[in-house]
Amino acid sequence: MTMIRKSVAATLAVLTGGTVAAVLLQPSPASAGRDREPVVIGHRGASALRPEHTLLSYETAIALGADFIEPDLVSTKDHVLVARHENEISATTDVENHPEFAARRATKAIDGVPVTGWFTEDFTLAELRTLRAEERVPDLRPENAAFNGLAQIPTLDEVVELARRHGVGVYPETKHPTYFDSIGLSLEEPMLEVLTRHGWRGPRDPVFIQSFETANLRALRGRTKLRLIQLVNASGAPYDRVAAGDPLTYDQMVTPAGLKDVASYADGVGVATSRIVPVGPDGHLLAPTTLVQDAHRAKLDVHTWTIRDENSQLPLDFRLGDPANPAYARATGNVAGWLSSLLDLGVDGVFADNPGTARAVLAGRDRA
C-alpha cells in the first residue's frame, strides 16, 4: 500500500472504527488494466468558488485543472442553447429585480412537477443578456455572492469556444429534453450543430453528452459518434419512461442486465455516489456495491457525482470538526479521503464542485 493510501486508510479507521475503511479501499477487480487516469469534470464549472454556469466559473475550473467543463443546457425562446442548471432562473439570476419581466412569472409543469418562476424559454437571448448571474446557494457559499452581478448567462457556443481555447473538453447535459421537445425547442439538434461546427464529432474528441432520460440518448446514438453518458439518479426513474408509462427504474438500470442494455447505446454511466457506496439509515456509509465492476464488465465507463468540499455535502464518515460549531456545515471536511476511496473502487471520472481538490488528490496519487 502506498503512503497516500496508508494515510487515507488511517483516517478512515479513525472515523469509522475500521469497518468501512477495509472495504472501501479494496480496488475494483474489474478495473484491472484500465490504465487511463480518471477525468476531472468541473461541475457547473467551479461552482464551489464562482456562481455556477458562468464563464467566470468555467474559467476557474480550467485554471484549477479540470479536464472537462460541464454546461447544463436549456433553450431560449429563439432556440439558442444557454448554460443553466434549470430553465427556471430565479435562483441563479437577478430576474426578480427586472420589473419589465414581472409579468413573465409563471407556473409550469416541468417533468410532471409544478414549478413557479421565470423560464428561459420565455426569453429571447437578447433579453436574457440583460440579466446577471447570482450565487444559487449563498448560505452555503457566501463568498461566491461577491461575484453576483458580474456575469451574463453564457451560450453553449461561448462555452465551447472557451474550452477549445484552453484545450479542455465539454460535458454538456440536456436538461428536461422531453419537456423541451413538447414545446418545439428540442435541445439535441442545436447542441450537435454547435459541437460539429467547432470540429467535435467523433469518439476521440473531448466531449461527453449526458442525460437522465433515455430516449434522447438512444436517438443521439444514431446521429453522432460522440460519447454518450447515461445519468443514473439515486432513486426514481427516467422521466421519458415515466411519461410513456414504462416501468423501468434507475434501480433496474444498474443491474448487470440493465447495464448491458445501457451499453447498447451509451459509452458510460454517470451515477450518484450513493450508487457506488450506499448510505445507511444512520447516515454512515455501507459496503460498496458491485456497480463499478458490473459497468466495467459491460465496457461502460463510470463517472460519479458530485464531490463537494463542505462537511454538509460529505458522508458523515468524512466530516471533520465539531458539529456544534456554527461554521461546521460550511467547513471543509475530509474530501480527499472520500474521493480517494471512490478512486480506489475504480471510477473513471468525478464531477467536482472544486476541481482543484480533485486534481490535487490525483496528483498526490501519481506521486505516491
Image (cartoon, rainbow, N blue to C red):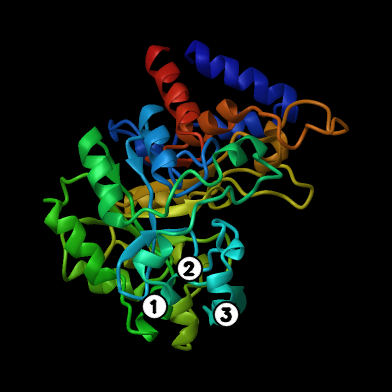
Which comes before the other along the chain, label 2 or label 3?
2
- The answer to whether mark 1 and mark 3 are in CB contact below 8 A is no
- The answer to whether mark 2 and mark 1 are in CB contact below 8 A is yes
Q: Which residue is mark 1?
A: 180
Query: Hey, which quadrant is residue 313 in on the image?
Result: top right
Closer-to-camera residue (340/358):
358
Q: Where's residue 68, x and y in %?
A: 33, 41
Q: Where's residue 244, x and y in %?
A: 44, 87
In the image: residue 283, left or right of residue 275:
right
* Residue at the image position 51 percent from the left and 51 percent from the top: 133
Q: Say which quadrant the C terminus sits in.
A: top left
- The answer to whether mark 2 and mark 3 are in CB contact below 8 A is no
* Residue at the image position 45 percent from the left and 47 percent from the top: 44
Disc ID at residue 103: 3
Q: Between marks 2 and 3, how big is the CA–CA gap?
A: 17 Å
Q: Residue lying furthest bottom in this view?
A: 245
Which comes before the other along the chain, label 2 or label 1?
2
Give the structural element (helix, strand or loop) at label 3: helix
Between tags 2 and 3, which lies in front? 3
Between tags 2 and 1, which lies in front? 2
* Residue at the image position 75 percent from the left and 37 percent from the top: 329
Q: Between marks 1 and 3, how big is the CA–CA gap?
A: 22 Å
Q: Between marks 2 and 1, how big is the CA–CA gap?
A: 10 Å
Residue type beneath disc 3: Ala
Local crowd size for mark 2, using a 10 Å CA cut-off: few (<14), some (14–19), many (≥20): many
Residue type beneath disc 1: Phe
Q: Where's residue 220, x and y in %?
A: 23, 69
